[in-house]
Image (cartoon, grey):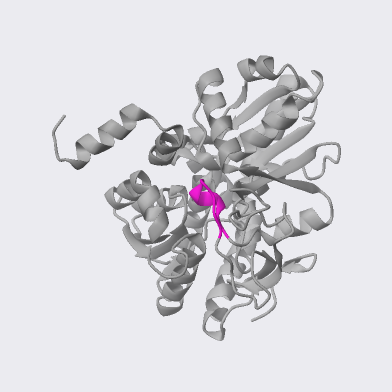
Amino acid sequence: MQKGKYYGKFGGCYIPEILVATFEELIDEFNKIKNDKQFQEDYQNLMSTFSCRPTPLYFAENLTKHFNGAKIYIKREDLNHTGSHKLNNVMGQGLLIKRMGKTRVIAETGAGQHGVATATMAAKFGLDCTIYMGEVDVMRQRPNVFWMEQLGATVVPVCEGSRTLKDAINEAFRDWVANMDDTHYALGTACGPAPFPEMVTFFQSIIGKETHKQIINFENKLPTKVFACVGGGSNAMGIFSGFLDDKEVELVGVEAGGNGIETAQHAARLASDDASIGIAQGYKTYFLQNSDGQMNETHSVAAGLDYVGVSPILSNLSETGRVRFEAINDEEAIEALSLAVKKEGIVPAMESAHAFGQAFKEAKNSSSDEIIIINQSGRGDKDIFTIADAFKDEKWEKFIKFKAEGYNA
C-alpha cells in the first residue's frame, strides 16, 4: 500500500499488504472521530479529570530578568499526568481502541515517557500492554522502565541494530503484523505511515490550542517565537499547530546536535546537511542514512531525540520555510537545564532542555517587547541518571557505589 496522506512530497503509507485491512479500519475510525462532538467531549473530559489539562503557561520572570531580553513563557507539559505531553496522544488512541474493540496495545518508546503513558492508558482501559524499547534506552531510562512494569506492561528490550528508538519501532511493527486482529499499535510520535502523523498531531494539538488562548489572555498579543524540541515531532507539532496560521509567529524546532553537527554523532535531520529523503518504517521523509539507504547511527544525551527520521509534516514545514530548525549539542542542553533548575526551580527533561538551550541563545539578543514561548514537553526526573552523570555529582556517584555494594541506607 503506497497511498495515504502526503504533506508536500512527504508522508504516505508504505506498508505490507497484510496490514492494509488494519490500516483501512484505523483510517476509517479516525476520520469518524475527527468531527464527532461526543468523542471530543469524552476526550476533553478525560484529559481534564484523569490528566491535568489545561496545563499552565508559566511566565519565567527570573529567566527573563537574567537574559534582559524577551519575555519568556514556558508551557508546562511536564505537569501533565505521567510527566510529559505523551498522554495527550495515547488517551485519544485509547478511546479509539475501545471503539474498535481491540484488547491489546503495543508501543515503542525511546525516552520512556511514551511507554509510561501507554502503560497508564492500558491500566485505565483494561488492556494488555507490551512496550518495545531499545536495550540502550532501557539502561539509561531505568526509572521509566520500572513504572511501565509496575503498571502491568511487558517491556521488551530490543537488542538489534543501534538498540534505540528506530529499532524499537521495527519490533513493534513486527508484533503488529503477527497480532493485528486484537492489537492496536499506539505509535507515539507524528511519524510512520498515514494516518499516524495526522492522528498524533490531532491529539497533541490540544497543547497549541491552549497556549494560543493563554498567551492572548496574559499579553493580549501573540508571541514572537515558539520553541519546541524535535525528536519524531509530536510535542513540536502539538504546540506549533496552534500558531501555524499566525504568520507573524516564528516557529523554531530544535534537534539534537549531539557531539556537534560537524561530527557524525548527532540526530539533526533538518538542521544539518547530513540527512536525505528516503522511505522507511512506512513513510517518506528525511532520514540520516548513507548513500545505500542504510540508516546511520545517531547520538544524543536525550534518549527521545536520537530518532533517525522526523515527522513528514515537519519536513514539509521546513521545506516551505514555515518552521526554522536549529541544533543544540549535548553540552548546551545540559547547561540550559542547569540554568532552568537554578533560576526557576523547574527541571526540564533532557529533550526539552534542547528547546530551552536555543531559546536562551535567542532571548538575550531580543528586545524586551518580544515574547518567546518554550514548550517544556517533559520533566527531568526520568533523566536522573543521565543528568547526575553529566553534572559529575560526587555525592550521586557515592550513592550509586553504595547501592551497588548492597548496603542498606
Is 102 within the magenta?
Answer: no
Q: Quadrant of residue 318?
A: bottom right
Which residue is located at x 42 percent, y 54 percent? 137
Which residue is located at x 66 percent, y 73 percent? 279
For residue 238, say whether it is visible. Answer: no
In the image, residue 213 above or below residue 187 = above
Q: Quadrant of residue 283?
A: bottom right
Is 300 within the magenta?
Answer: yes
In the rendered structure, the answer to whether residue 320 lies left or right of residue 73 reads right
x then y, percent, for residue 294: 60, 74
Closer to us: 161 or 282? 161
x then y, percent, for residue 231: 59, 52
In the rendered structure, the answer to whether residue 324 lies left or right of residue 287 reads right
Which residue is located at x 40 percent, y 72 percent? 182
In the image, residue 338 above or below residue 228 = above
For residue 403, say whether it is visible. Answer: yes
x then y, percent, for residue 35: 66, 55
Identify the image quadrant of the C terminus.
Answer: top left
Which residue is located at x 62 percent, y 33 percent? 356
In the image, residue 144 above or below residue 6 = above
Tell me the magenta residue range. 298-307
In the rendered structure, the answer to whether residue 141 lies left or right of residue 296 reads left
In the rendered structure, the answer to whether residue 201 lies left or right of residue 316 reads left
Identify the image quadrant of the N terminus.
Answer: bottom right
What kind of secondary structure does the magenta stretch mostly adopt? loop
